[in-house]
């Protein structure tokens, strides 16, 4: 019988994972192999105190589980899993394949990854292997099979955690196995060398290939390397890593066809994996998120990451697999979280669709490179503020069980396309100011400040459920994306496009004719010339807005001009346009707007699209999760003062009735449950 992927949400094992406890799933990575057995017993007592009901084990235990190739020792892991089970704590069992053992490197040195500039990386760390190494894939499948066979029927097992953060810290490898696999991948994609030569534009700089084995990985070269080749190498790398995941998942499926399998994503980290493809292969989306400690708006970036994760999950509940209770250890300045921040962060993820809140890690390590990373249980032990906050969060999550399975809905979507980001990030683009991430964050922040909930979409996703789609930076848009966005507007949707979008096709080739080839028709304009600005140069628009970084020389065909440039290189030319197209409308903004200028533009667009965007209380995040019958309004107060917010129903964290107004204390969260 074919095994279904993903497992149906209503299957008993998925229900058990997400509903099998009295509260929300709560816990973290647990690495007991770093401690004596007496400590495990103490840990488990503390876990019970905190209401922990799920821990991830064995993530980095390969060297202990298989001390010599083909020789296994599961005594310690048996003991740990049994102890956890006796305490009523379920297990998210990892395959330990992110850190192969020392014997593996000695025996299979060719599996070591090679960087783009030719350095073969050594061991003594983790996450470093060529994803195309047949020796690695075979060894990974072997340890996975042993684990799956041994623990298939263990009652504690509720979830499989394959590997750890595929692609981190490095993803692409320029070793011989990768080059050979890349050639096969290209043969599958293009069929013939003639097609490849055409798609890669190899007549440029005389790069024409006559034999497949002339093709190399796009390693560091004398000057800028063929960008179509580099883009394909990114795609190939994402696929090669995904094959590693599927290789292990399919072994697991043979032994536990019903137990959900996942791997932890890093949703907004686009270095290595095109998660739109990956999310099709996991039973439940799991994500790791760490604050950028020094950014004052890091809670907004957290919300962005959580919204993207929910979108990757297709709106279904997801699991926050890792975040931190306090400081991490790998940023330039590892700023500690302030009192209450741990809960605010956790509940923001929950508000945006998470049905599990886990941390890295349960007990802080005393040795190893992460000894200065925070944990649920700090070095200083249980008599600490962090531990008290961990226990309090466990209680809160216990009260929030009714929220499980409810969903967040949005009528605005932001386009997020990893392939476009990869392509835009290559060298020799028209301006160093062209940052897709910067633009997405700018648009997202304006919407967050107005408490407009957004989903993220791939440009070829079904869009008919949205009133407004925004493409803050979509440099690459293939024909399917072009048709999809154009069709969305034709059918009555509202589309807002920011500069340097729709420029190239899937091979990073400029569309024929004037820019923006993929969006010319829907925007009703052409751009004969890009006119990027000097560093720190500003331009003034006829509506008094100020632009920076970029302008275009625009010729409108059917679009109407909403604002013109009053100075700068595009003086007198259109700056912001609107095109009525079919039953819908498409806006184009050709310069970088920020702050109030971007906010007022978005407000116009939101109003035209019929979306309520009245500003609420600044700094109070309001987001609703719903079922067919119930609403759960999360009010997260990021300010230093108590805020009175409108709501009616029952406040779940304090179990009190709310009649019209709920007071949300400074830094705290309230969750008001009401019937729809
Ligand atoms: C994650 C990783 C964990 C731990 C954590 C520290 O990226 O999966 O194993 O290293 O970072 O922040």
Image (spheres, rainbow, N blue to C red):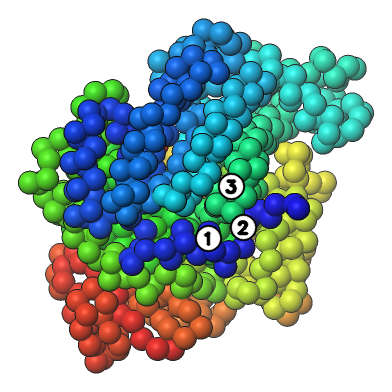
Dot 2: element: loop
Name which of mark 1 and mark 3 comes first in the sequence: 1
Instruction: Give me the residue at 24% from left, 50% from top.
Output: 47
Residue lying at 68% horizontally and 47% vertically, measured from the top left: 476
- Residue that badge 3 annotates: 256
Q: Earlier along the polypeptide chain: callout 2 or callout 3?
A: 2
Residue at left 29%, top 33%?
32
Q: Secondary structure at mark 3?
A: loop
**Ligand 1, image quadrant it occupies:** top left
Picture coordinates of residue 402 (x, y %)?
A: 37, 75
Q: Quadrant of the C terminus?
A: bottom left
In this view, the residue in front, 537 or 86, is: 86
Apparent side of residue 527 relative to residue 345 in the rendered image (left or right): right
Instruction: Measure the alpha-carbon separation of dots 1 and 3.
Output: 13 Å
Q: Residues within 10 Å of mark 1 (few under 14, many from 20)?
A: many
Residue 7, which numbered label? 2
Q: Position of residue 306 (x, y in %)?
A: 43, 57
Pick the front one: 520 or 675: 675
Residue under numbered circle 1: 14
Residue 323, relative to residue 315: is it above or below? above
3D distance between C-alphas at marks 2 and 1: 7 Å
Q: Secondary structure at mark 1?
A: helix
């Amino acid at each position: 019988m074919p095994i279904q992927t993903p497992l149906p949400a209503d299957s008993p094992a998925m229900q058990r994972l997400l509903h099998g406890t009295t509260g929300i799933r709560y816990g973290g990575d647990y690495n007991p192999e770093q401690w004596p057995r007496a400590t495990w017993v103490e840990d488990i007592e503390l876990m019970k105190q905190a209401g922990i009901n799920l821990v991830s084990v064995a993530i980095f235990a390969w060297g202990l589980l298989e001390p010599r190739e083909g020789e296994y020792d599961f005594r310690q892991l048996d003991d740990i899993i049994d102890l956890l089970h006796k305490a009523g704590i379920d297990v998210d069992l990892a395959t330990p394949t992110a850190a192969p053992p020392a014997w593996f490197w000695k025996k299979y040195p060719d599996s070591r990854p090679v960087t783009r500039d030719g350095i073969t990386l050594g061991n003594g760390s983790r996450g470093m292997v060529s994803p195309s190494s047949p020796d690695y894939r075979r060894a990974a499948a072997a340890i996975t099979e042993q684990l799956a066979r041994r623990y298939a029927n263990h009652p504690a097992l509720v979830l499989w955690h394959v590997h750890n953060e595929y692609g981190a810290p490095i993803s692409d490898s320029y070793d011989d196995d990768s080059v050979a696999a890349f050639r096969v991948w290209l043969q599958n994609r293009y069929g013939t060398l003639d097609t490849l030569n055409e798609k890669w534009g190899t007549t440029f700089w005389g790069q024409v290939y006559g034999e497949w084995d002339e093709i190399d990985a796009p390693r560091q070269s004398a000057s800028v390397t063929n960008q179509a080749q580099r883009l394909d190498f990114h795609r190939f790398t994402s696929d090669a890593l995904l094959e590693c995941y599927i290789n292990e998942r399919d072994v697991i499926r043979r032994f536990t066809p019903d137990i959900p399998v996942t791997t932890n994503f890093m949703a907004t980290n686009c270095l290595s994996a095109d998660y739109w493809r990956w999310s099709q292969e996991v039973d439940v989306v799991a994500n790791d998120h760490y604050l950028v400690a020094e950014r004052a708006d890091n809670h907004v970036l957290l919300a962005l990451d959580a919204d993207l994760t929910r979108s990757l999950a297709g709106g279904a509940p997801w699991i926050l697999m890792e975040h931190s209770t306090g400081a991490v250890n790998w940023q330039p300045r590892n700023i500690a979280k302030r009192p209450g921040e741990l809960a605010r962060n956790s509940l923001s993820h929950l508000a945006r669709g998470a049905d599990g809140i886990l941390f890295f890690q349960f007990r802080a390590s005393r040795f190893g490179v992460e000894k200065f990373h925070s944990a649920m249980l700090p070095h200083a032990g249980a008599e600490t503020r962090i531990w008290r906050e961990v226990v309090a969060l466990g209680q809160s999550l216990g009260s929030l069980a009714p929220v499980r399975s409810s969903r967040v809905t949005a009528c605005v979507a932001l386009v997020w396309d990893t392939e476009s980001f990869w392509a835009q990030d290559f060298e020799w683009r028209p301006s160093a100011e062209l940052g897709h991430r910067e633009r997405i964050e700018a648009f997202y922040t304006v919407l967050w400040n107005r408490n407009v909930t957004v989903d993220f979409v791939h440009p070829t996703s079904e869009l008919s459920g949205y009133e407004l789609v925004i493409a803050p930076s979509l440099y690459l848009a293939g024909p399917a994306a072009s048709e999809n966005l154009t069709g969305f507007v034709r059918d009555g949707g509202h589309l807002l496009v920011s500069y340097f979008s729709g420029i190239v096709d899937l091979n990073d080739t400029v569309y024929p004719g004037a820019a923006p080839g993929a969006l010319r028709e829907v925007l009703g304009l052409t751009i004969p010339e890009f006119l990027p600005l000097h560093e720190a140069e500003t331009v003034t628009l006829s509506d008094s807005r100020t632009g920076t970084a970029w302008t275009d020389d625009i010729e409108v065909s059917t679009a109407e001009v909403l604002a013109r440039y009053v100075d700068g290189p595009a003086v007198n030319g259109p700056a912001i346009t609107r095109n009525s197209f079919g039953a819908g409308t498409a806006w184009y903004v050709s310069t970088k707007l920020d702050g109030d200028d971007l906010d007022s533009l978005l407000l116009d667009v939101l109003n035209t699209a019929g979306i309520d965007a009245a500003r609420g209380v600044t700094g109070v995040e309001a987001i609703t999760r719903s079922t067919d019958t119930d609403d759960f309004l999360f009010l997260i107060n990021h300010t230093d003062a108590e805020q009175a917010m409108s709501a009616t129903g029952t406040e779940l964290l304090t179990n009190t009735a709310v009649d019209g107004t709920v007071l949300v204390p400074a830094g705290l969260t309230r969750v008001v449950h009401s019937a729809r």
